[in-house]
Image (tube, rainbow, N blue to C red):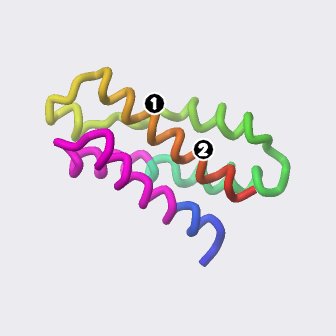
Amino acid sequence: MSQFDDFLAEVKTGIAQIATLEARDFVTQATGDGQQLVDALEPDLRLWTQQLQAGRLSKSDFEFLVKGKSNVAQMKALTHAGVTAIRIDQIRAALIKLVIAAATKMV
């Protein structure tokens, strides 16, 4: 298993934990939306984590790039379930923090 695969596994585990903690009544929707976020970002994350490991990208640059792509997390299932926009933003932020924390552990 590659380091990137380990990173993805950690993020996927974290998604389930965030869904349980942050969206108790909507765990299935939050988990699905979190997985969609990772799937949408995977090509970029693969490149950025390689650059981070190689020292061609700083941790702050990595964080900036990931946060800049947070708009791809449309959180459709949570929106459809009637979760408030503020709560969705909090869940999205927790997912982005998870991705950043998991990636910076690789360095």
Percent x, y for residue 75? 31, 37
How many marks the image carries: the answer is: 2
Residue 43 is marked as none
Q: Which of the 4 quarters of the picture holds residue 7?
A: bottom right
Q: What range is drawn magenta here? A: 9-37
Magenta: main secondary structure equals: helix
Looking at the image, residue 99 lies above or below residue 3: above
Quadrant where the image shows the N terminus? bottom right
Percent x, y for residue 54? 83, 56
Residue extending furthest toward the front: 21
Q: Earlier in the sequence, mark 2 or mark 1?
A: 1
Badge 2 is on which residue? 100
Q: Residues within 10 Å of mark 1 (few under 14, many from 20)?
A: few
Q: Residues within 10 Å of mark 2 (few under 14, many from 20)?
A: many
Residue 71 is marked as 1
Percent x, y for residue 86? 32, 21
Q: Residue at x 37, y 53 (%)?
A: 17
Q: Which of the 4 quarters of the picture holds residue 67?
A: top right
Depth order, front residue of 36/14:
14
Amino acid type indicated by mark 1: Asn
Percent x, y for residue 94? 45, 38
Structural distance between the alpha carbons of marks 2 and 1: 15 Å
